[in-house]
Amino acid sequence: MPEHLELPRPLRLLRTTVWSLLESAGLPVAAIAVAGWLGGRNAGLIAGLAAAWLLAAGRKIATGNVPSLLTISAVVLTLQTAMVLATGQIWLYLLQFPAANLVMCVLFARTARGPSPLVARLAAEVVALRQPATHHPGLHRFFQGATWLWAGIFLLLTAGLAVLMVTEPTGLFVALSTALTIALTVAGIGVSALWFRSVLRRFGLALRFAPT
């Protein structure tokens, strides 16, 4: 039998992915929106930060570990909230955007050479991807390389947003930074997917749904 990677059945895969995204982004953003509407920008940020860390604490107590995506969300929200609350000048407020991407770059890069690259952990947590029972060096090298790829993408975003921050007015900066972030993220997803497909073909690995 050829080695294979396994995904949950479609309905369970959808539930797993939706809950992961809701937990790491949806609930904190909802807290920001509601508290911001009731008490203003600062109240919203504090509520979102509290929601992220409460979710992380609840996960730690319930399961003994915190999902990587939730950890990233909590760390980035902490940085952004601190910078926004401390700001008295527009440049310091805008600095949160390249700074958040720099944090993401560091988080990905620090795991890229280790035994548990962040991309592999995210694949296991967000879409419940199960790798072959036996360690596969080629697959591990892919996840290490993909983690370096995303570290590089976040580094490019850091540099790009920093340049835009000092060269463009605020309104144009927000529009261009959003466009740049979307473009590089979509490109990264496309490259990662094609790379993953080529690795599966090269090593004769199959990707299939789990049995019922």
Image (cartoon, helix red, strand yellow):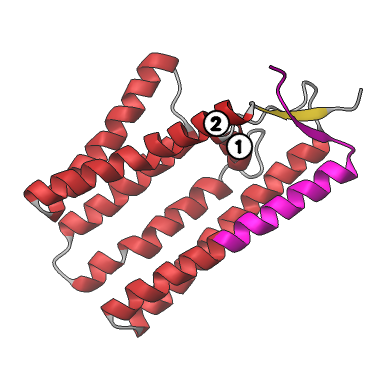
Cα distance, mark 1 to mark 2? 6 Å
Residue 184 point in image, percent of width and height = 55, 65
Q: Quadrant of the C terminus?
A: top right
Residue 18 point in image, percent of width and height = 46, 36
Vertical relation: 141 (above or below) 116: below
Residue bounds of the magenta highlight: 186-212
User: Which residue is depicted at the point 65% across and 38% down?
Assistant: 114
Provide the secondary structure element on which disc 2 rests: helix
Residue nearer the viewer, 175 or 53: 175
Vertical relation: 110 (above or below) 154: above
Q: Amino acid at mark 1?
A: Ala
Residue farthest left in this picture: 39
Q: Tell me the tag on residue 123.
A: 1
Vertical relation: 183 (above or below) 61: below
Quadrant of res 162: bottom left
User: Which residue is depicted at the point 33% across and 22% down?
Assistant: 58
Q: Residues within 10 Å of mark 1 (few under 14, many from 20)?
A: some
Residue 163 point in image, percent of width and height = 42, 78
Looking at the image, do the residues carrying marks 1 and 2 touch, with CB atoms under 8 Å apart? yes
User: Which residue is depicted at the point 88% across and 40% down?
Assistant: 203
Position of 7 with respect to 84 (left or right) is: right
Read off the residue under disc 2: 125
Provide the secondary structure element on which disc 1 rests: helix
Position of 99 with respect to 129 (left or right) is: left
Residue 61 point in image, percent of width and height = 36, 16
> Is residue 124 one of those drawn in magenta?
no
Position of 187 with respect to 196 (left or right) is: left
> Is residue 202 one of those drawn in magenta?
yes
Q: Amino acid at mark 2?
A: Glu
The secondary structure that most of the magenta stretch takes on is: helix
